[in-house]
Amino acid sequence: MKTIDKEFTSKNFSFKQIHREEEFAIYERFHDSTPEKKHYEVVKILSHNGYAIGGKKYPASEFYPSSNGWGTDGFTCVTKKSAYEKLDKIMEDHKIREEDKRRKEKK
């Protein structure tokens, strides 16, 4: 599986992964015109098993949440400290949801 890039640019923003645990990560983000003003994005890294569109094949890979996933799979934080706090929270929430899912499957 192709892993998500640790550094990339999108819409005049630069992103740099500063922490990753399992499928969760923190990216430092800044606008190219103001690199001193940093924000932090806490994300659940998503993945797909590969697909084909119009005869072109795309291998299995990880990807960043879309803007529609913000508030569920992605969060913007103003400070690095708040980003790590949010990371802890979403990892704990994910663990609880997975345990609930396993319990329901056993019934």
Image: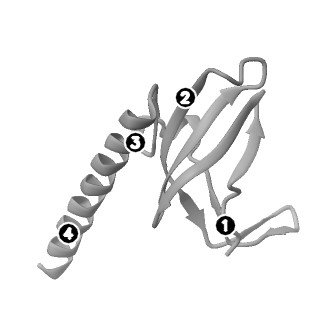
Give the left or right position of residue 82, taking residue 38 as reference.
left
Work out which residue is located at the far left of the displayed protein and give it: 107
Can you say whether 91 is above or below 101 in the image?
above
User: Which label belongs to residue 72?
Assistant: 3
Indicate which label's residue lies in the foreground, 1 or 2: 2
Indicate which label's residue lies in the foreground, 4 or 2: 2
User: Which label belongs to residue 99?
Assistant: 4
Alpha-carbon span between mark 1 and mark 2: 23 Å
Q: Sort mark 2 into few (<14), some (14-19) or many (20+) by Cα contacts within 10 Å.
A: some
SS for dot 2? strand
Question: Which is nearer the N-term, disc 1 or disc 4?
Answer: 1
CB of mark 3 within 8 Å of CB of mark 1? no
* Quarter of the figure with the C terminus: bottom left
Alpha-carbon span between mark 2 and mark 3: 18 Å
Q: Amino acid at mark 3?
A: Thr
SS for dot 4? helix
Q: Nearer the viewer, residue 75 or 106?
A: 75
User: Which label belongs to residue 39?
Assistant: 2
Q: Amino acid at mark 4?
A: Glu
Can you say whether 63 is above or below 30 in the image?
below
* Quarter of the figure with the N terminus: bottom right
Work out which residue is located at the far bottom of the displayed protein and give it: 106
Alpha-carbon span between mark 4 and mark 3: 18 Å
CB of mark 2 within 8 Å of CB of mark 3? no
